């Protein structure tokens, strides 16, 4: 009986641990809310440090973003990562800037209706 109880407790702990560690995909609204909170930290004159902080705040959202918002979050992160470099590649920054603008438009459509 003692062994059975131990096995059942262990199985329960494993099941609950796997449920806690499994990342659930956010809804579009939840993704919008989280990105909005993280993006609120972008100052007008973004320094390299501020850009890194905002990118790091958005980075965990990318893994759980809704299907509609994942490309938006990815485009934002790619742009911020390039912009935060000591010497950003201007050509690449231009390309990523265009994608960043499109992501902003899509963000507005999905999040602000």
Image (cartoon, rainbow, N blue to C red):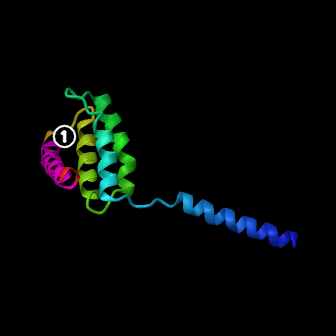
- The image shows residue 67, relative to residue 93, as above or below, that is below
- The image shows residue 52, relative to residue 11, as above or below, that is above
Q: Is residue 106 left or right of residue 64?
A: left
User: Which is nearer the eye, 82 or 74?
Assistant: 74
Q: Is residue 104 magenta?
A: yes
How many marks are shown on the rendered structure?
Answer: 1
Coordinates of residue 6 in the picture (x, y in percent): 80, 66
The quarter of the picture where the N terminus appears is bottom right
Coordinates of residue 28 in the picture (x, y in percent): 30, 57
Please identify the dominant SS of the magenta region: helix
Coordinates of residue 10 in the picture (x, y in percent): 73, 65
Q: Is residue 108 left or right of residue 12?
A: left
Residue sitting at x 28%, y 39%:
39
Residue sitting at x 34%, y 59%:
27
Q: Is residue 84 magenta?
A: no
User: Which is nearer the eye, 25 or 51?
Assistant: 25
Q: Is residue 58 left or right of residue 98?
A: right
In the image, which residues are magenta?
Answer: 91-110
Residue sticking out furthest to the front: 113
Residue sitting at x 35%, y 34%:
53
| Badge 1 element | loop
Coordinates of residue 57 in the picture (x, y in percent): 37, 41
Residue that numbered label 1 is attached to? 89
Residue sitting at x 33%, y 40%:
38
Q: Residues within 10 Å of mark 1 (few under 14, many from 20)?
A: few
The image quadrant that residue 106 belongs to is: bottom left
- The image shows residue 108, relative to residue 57, as above or below, that is below
User: Which is nearer the eye, 100 or 4?
Assistant: 4
Q: Is residue 51 left or right of residue 98?
A: right
The quarter of the picture where the C terminus appears is bottom left
């Amino acid at each position: 009986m003692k062994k059975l109880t131990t096995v059942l407790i262990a199985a329960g702990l494993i099941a609950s641990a796997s449920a806690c560690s499994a990342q659930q995909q956010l809804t579009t609204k939840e993704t919008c809310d989280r990105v909005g909170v993280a993006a609120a930290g972008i100052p007008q004159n973004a320094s390299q440090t501020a850009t890194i902080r905002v990118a790091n705040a958005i980075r965990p959202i990318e893994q759980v973003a809704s299907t509609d918002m994942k490309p938006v979050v990815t485009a934002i992160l790619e742009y911020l990562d390039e912009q935060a470099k000591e010497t950003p590649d201007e050509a690449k920054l231009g390309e990523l800037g265009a994608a960043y603008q499109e992501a902003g438009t899509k963000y507005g459509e999905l999040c602000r209706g």
